[in-house]
Image (cartoon, helix red, strand yellow):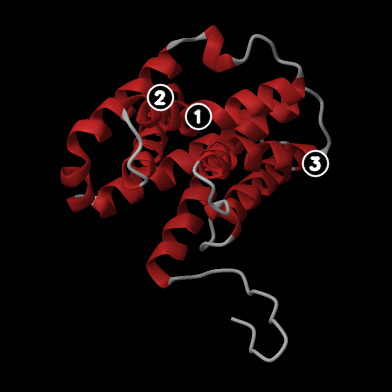
C-alpha cells in the first residue's frame, strides 16, 4: 500500500512540476525535465547525501516512468487539471506525507540522529520542488508559502517520537504520513502560515 502511494505521490509531484513549466511557457523538454526533478529530485538528493547509491529513483525506474507520465499528462491536459485543483492539492498533500515518512525512515535506517532524520523527511518531501523553483528562477515556494516544508519536518519529528516510544518503523511511517498530510490539509483549508519577520516600518504578517 505504501509503495503504491509512493508512486502516486511521485506522479502527482511530477504533475505539479510540469504545470509550473507550462506556466513559464517552457517547451515539451522543459515540461518533462521539471516533472522529473519535482517527482524524484528530493529522493535523489537524499540518497546522494546518505551515500545510498544508486539512488532509489535510478535503481527502480518506475519512479522515472511515473514522473514522465505526470509530465505528459500535464503537457496535454494543463487546462483540465486546473479545473480539478482541489483534488490535485489533496493528492499533493498525501504525497507530501508519504515522502516525508519515507525520508525519515531512510534517514533512521542509515543511522542518523533525530535532527538528521527530521532533515531527511523535509528534504525528501520538498527537495524536488526547491530544484524546480530554482530552475525557473523563483524563490522556492516552500520558503514563502503556507505550511508545506514545516508539515514535512513535523512529520519527521513524529517518526522520531514513534521510534523513541518503541512503536517500530511501521507505525512510525503511518503516523508520520498521517500527521504530515493532515497538517498540510489543515493549513490549506485555514490559510495557516508561519509568521514573517517585519521589515522596518511595517507590521509582521
Q: Secondary structure at mark 3?
A: helix
Q: Is residue 133 above or below residue 14?
A: below
Say which residue appears at 41% left-offset and 38% top-offset.
Answer: 17
The answer for how far apart the CA atoms under marks 2 and 3 are is: 26 Å
What residue does disc 1 label? 37
> Looking at the figure, which quarter contains the C terminus?
bottom right
**Are there few (<14), some (14-19), or many (20+) residues within 10 Å of tag 1?**
many
- Residue 7 on image: x %, y %: 40, 24
Q: Residue furthest bottom?
A: 201
The answer for how far apart the CA atoms under marks 2 and 1 are is: 14 Å
Say which residue appears at 57% left-offset and 51% top-offset.
Answer: 140
The nearer-to-camera label among 2 and 1 is 1
What residue does disc 3 label? 114
What residue does disc 2 label? 7
- Residue 179 on image: x %, y %: 53, 51
Callout 2 touching callout 3 (CB < 8 Å): no
Amino acid at each position: 500500500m505504501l509503495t503504491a502511494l509512493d508512486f502516486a505521490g511521485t506522479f502527482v509531484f511530477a504533475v505539479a512540476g510540469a504545470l509550473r513549466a507550462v506556466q513559464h511557457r517552457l517547451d515539451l523538454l522543459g515540461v518533462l525535465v521539471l516533472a522529473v526533478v519535482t517527482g524524484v529530485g528530493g529522493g535523489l538528493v537524499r540518497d546522494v547525501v546518505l551515500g545510498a547509491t544508486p539512488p532509489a529513483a535510478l535503481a527502480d525506474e518506475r519512479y522515472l516512468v511515473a514522473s514522465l507520465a505526470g509530465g505528459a499528462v500535464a503537457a496535454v491536459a494543463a487546462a483540465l487539471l486546473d479545473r480539478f485543483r482541489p483534488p490535485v492539492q489533496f493528492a499533493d498533500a498525501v504525497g507530501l506525507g508519504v515522502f516525508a515518512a519515507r525520508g525519515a525512515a531512510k534517514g533512521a535506517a542509515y543511522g542518523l540522529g533525530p535532527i538528521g532524520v527530521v532533515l531527511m523527511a523535509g528534504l525528501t518531501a520538498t527537495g524536488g520542488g526547491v530544484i524546480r523553483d530554482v530552475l525557473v528562477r523563483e524563490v522556492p515556494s516552500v520558503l514563502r508559502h503556507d505550511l508545506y516544508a514545516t508539515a514535512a519536518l513535523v512529520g519527521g519529528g513524529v517518526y522520531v517520537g514513534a521510534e523513541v516510544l518503541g512503536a517500530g518503523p511501521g507505525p512510525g511511517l503511518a503516523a508520520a504520513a498521517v500527521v504530515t498530510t493532515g497538517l498540510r490539509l489543515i493549513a490549506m483549508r485555514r490559510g495557516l502560515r508561519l509568521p514573517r519577520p517585519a521589515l522596518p516600518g511595517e507590521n509582521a504578517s
